[in-house]
Image (cartoon, grey):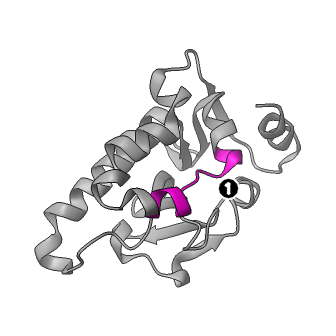
């Protein structure tokens, strides 16, 4: 957590940070849980082996923070970053939605391996690319759409730390 904490201490953003009280099995084995419960359903083991990796800054973040937000001034978060448990659940839901919407989007498999890590306002969702074949480590700002609609034009941040530094 030291790199993330040093970064947060030096950023110009005013974040509310909720510290992680207990490191769960999901957080300890975050990448393995994502592979086993989500990505192995959509990608071959060879694709996962060659392409999947959660960027280290986000892994470090989830080992110490359960939630980070920038308030809108009315008590509600305007910009937020999910901790590991919430990111896992949100990502799982997003890939389940991919299956539910198959008739609409006509894709045979998701376009990339990305995890949902937060959002801002009421229609923006952040996806962190964990796919070495698709803008690894960059953050997509998905506006009123789904993970399977992401394009390079949706990339707003070059890295997780870039997103924390710049905010919205």
Residue 53 falls inside the magenta stretch:
yes
Question: Seen in the image, is 63 located left or right of residue 106?
Answer: right
Quadrant location of the N terminus? top right
Quadrant location of the C terminus? bottom right
Instruction: Residue lying at the far top in this picture: please name it.
Output: 22
- Where in the figure is residue 132, as x and y percent of width and height? 59, 67
Q: Give the residue at x 40% y 56%.
A: 45
Question: Foreground: 104 or 143?
Answer: 104
Magenta stretch mostly in which secondary structure?
Answer: helix
Question: Foreground: 97 or 82?
Answer: 97
Location of residue 96 (image quadrant): bottom left
Question: Seen in the image, is 39 located left or right of residue 70?
Answer: left
Residue identified by numbered label 1: 160
- Where in the figure is residue 129, as x and y percent of width and height? 55, 63
The answer to whether one can see residue 57 in this image is: yes
For disc 1, the neighbor class at 10 Å (few under 14, some 14 to 19, many from 20) is many
Location of residue 22 (image quadrant): top right
- Where in the figure is residue 88, as x and y percent of width and height? 41, 41
Residue 150 falls inside the magenta stretch:
no
Q: Secondary structure at mark 1?
A: helix
The answer to whether one can see residue 75 in this image is: no
- Where in the figure is residue 43, as x and y percent of width and height? 35, 62
Q: Give the residue at x 21% y 79%.
A: 105
């Amino acid at each position: 957590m030291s790199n993330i904490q040093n970064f947060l201490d030096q950023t110009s953003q005013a974040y509310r940070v909720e510290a992680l009280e207990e490191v769960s099995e999901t957080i300890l084995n975050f990448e393995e849980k994502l592979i086993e419960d989500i990505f192995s359903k959509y990608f071959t083991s060879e694709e996962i082996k060659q392409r999947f990796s959660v960027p280290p800054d986000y892994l470090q973040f989830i080992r110490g923070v359960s939630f980070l937000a920038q308030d809108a001034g009315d008590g509600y978060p305007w910009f937020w970053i999910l901790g590991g448990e919430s990111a896992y659940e949100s990502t799982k839901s997003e890939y389940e939605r991919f299956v539910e919407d198959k008739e609409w989007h006509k894709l045979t498999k998701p376009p990339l391996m990305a995890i949902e890590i937060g959002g801002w306002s009421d229609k923006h969702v952040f996806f962190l690319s964990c796919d070495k074949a698709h803008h690894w480590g960059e953050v997509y700002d998905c506006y009123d759409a789904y993970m399977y609609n992401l394009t390079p034009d949706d990339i707003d941040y070059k890295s997780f730390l870039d997103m924390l530094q710049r905010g919205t």
